[in-house]
Image (cartoon, helix red, strand yellow):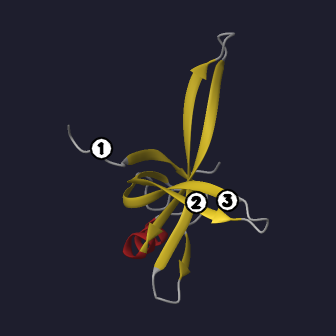
């Protein structure tokens, strides 16, 4: 049996400019979100468009390149892995969040083009 891999590819539009944070260690983290759309027919045969937002995160050089070449509304392909994190709230409750850790991306928008939402 082949090993299973954690791999995801999304094509959509950036919801915000990439926000870069630099940690005290010098590590850079870029965060944004990507919107994807799907279309289906409901039980009445009516066409429905559904938009889903996916949080994405990039590290170091990838984060810097994304910040340089992408902006809100950019049509983009991202490839990476699903990354789940957990944290404790002030009340001690454990919460989970899932994001896409970007390894590669491709900008489909022209240099000066960003599509509005």
Q: Nearer the viewer, residue 109 or 101?
A: 101
* Position of residue 4 measured from the top left corner of the image (x, y, whole percent): 29, 44
Q: Which mark is residue 4?
A: 1
Q: Which mark is residue 94?
A: 3
Q: Secondary structure at mark 2?
A: loop
Alpha carbon separation for disc pair 3 and 2: 32 Å
* Position of residue 26 measured from the top left corner of the image (x, y, whole percent): 46, 87
For the question of whether residue 73 can be seen, the reply is no
Camera-nearest label, 3 or 2: 3
Q: Secondary structure at mark 3?
A: strand
Task: Report crowding for label 3: few under 14, some 14 to 19, many 20 or more residues within 10 A (C-alpha).
Answer: few
Residue occupying the point 63% across, 65% down: 87
Count of numbered badges drawn on the protein = 3
Alpha carbon separation for disc pair 1 and 3: 28 Å
* Position of residue 68 measured from the top left corner of the image (x, y, whole percent): 45, 72
Residue occupying the point 44% across, 46% down: 10
| N-term-proximal mark, 1 vs 3 | 1
Q: Which mark is residue 72?
A: 2
Q: Residue at the right extreme?
A: 91
Q: Nearer the viewer, residue 69 or 103?
A: 103
Question: What is the quadrant of residue 86 in the picture?
Answer: bottom right
Horizontal relation, residue 35 to residue 80: left or right: right
Q: Secondary structure at mark 1?
A: loop
């Amino acid at each position: 049996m082949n090993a299973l891999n954690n791999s995801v590819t999304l094509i959509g539009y950036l919801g915000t400019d990439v926000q870069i944070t630099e940690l005290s260690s010098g590590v850079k983290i870029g965060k944004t979100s990507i919107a994807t759309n799907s279309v289906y027919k409901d039980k009445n045969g009516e066409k429905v468009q559904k938009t889903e937002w996916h949080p994405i995160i990039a590290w170091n050089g990838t984060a810097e390149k994304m910040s340089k070449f992408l902006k809100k509304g950019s049509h983009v392909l991202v490839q990476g892995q699903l990354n789940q994190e957990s944290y404790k709230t002030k009340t001690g409750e454990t919460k989970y969040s899932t994001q896409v850790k970007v390894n590669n991306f491709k900008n489909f928008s022209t240099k000066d083009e960003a599509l509005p939402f």
